[in-house]
Image: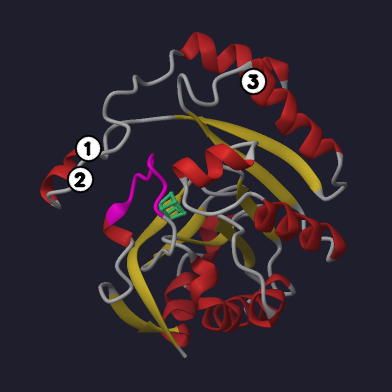
Amino acid sequence: MMLKVHSIQSLGTLDGPGIRFVVFLQGCHLRCKCCHNPDTWDMGAGKEMTTAELAERVARYREYFGRDGGITVSGGEPLLQAEAVAQLFELCHQGGINTCLDTSGSIMNSRVKKLLSVTDRVLLDIKYTNDQEYVENVGCHMKPVLDFLQVLEDMDVPTTLRQVIIPSINDSAQNVHCLREIRDAHRNVDSVELLAFRKLCQTKYQSMNMPFPFAHIPEPTQDIMDKLTALL
Ligand code: SF4
């Protein structure tokens, strides 16, 4: 099967455990105002690659993966190409390579369930902890994401919750408290990562002739990040 690929990072350390071959897929149905990768949105762009070709490229890096590493498929939104990602993960499993999926968790159907059955870990981007902020700043409701998390628990998929901390929007103790509640309510969630909002992507928006919706928001200080992480 074919996958629409935006880019590949051969040896990444930020997207899942250990050292990972990271495939960023093309296409996203959401419009997060903090999105770092607006160039992944257009489903019509990107490069087509077969699952076999990608699996063969991942296998070349196997010796670097060690015990924890493997492949991570990110985006864009990989659930839009769930059937082909499932095939890629099956091929990776046949080669003994660990599989990780980085997703917004906003789509659920039989193809997604099949994909989750061959996924060793999910990085679930819980973007906010209330519905109003989801609707305003993401373009979808929060309930599908919580339902997705419930499916992950039902299927026993180890899960890391991730959230970008954006000053004046979700940099509060109350937000972290909500994240803790979500973590504690699901036995498959074994870690939570808070990521600092960064504005490096502004140049991408400029080159695409689009306004960056959060241009007016400052990046969080290390002090804020440390305090919120300690609250976890
Ligand atoms: S889900 Fe990811 S790729 Fe899609 S708009 Fe949000 S941050 Fe960007």
Q: CA distance from mark 2 to mark 3?
A: 30 Å
Number of marks: 3
Whether the residue carrying mark 3 lies under 8 Å from ligand 1 is answered with: no
Q: Residues within 10 Å of mark 2 (few under 14, many from 20)?
A: some
Q: Secondary structure at mark 1?
A: helix
Tell me where residue 20 appears, x and y as whole percent. 51, 55
- Quarter of the image where one finds residue 181: top right
Residue 222 sits above or below residue 92 on the image: above
Residue found at x 37% / y 45%: 35
CB within 8 Å, label 1 to label 2: yes
Q: Is residue 169 part of the magenta span, yes or no?
A: no
Q: Which residues are magenta?
A: 31-38
Camera-near label (2 vs 3) is: 2
The residue at which mark 3 appears reads as 229
| Disc 2: which residue | 205
Could you tell me how far apart the alpha carbons at marks 1 and 3 are, in whole angstroms?
A: 26 Å
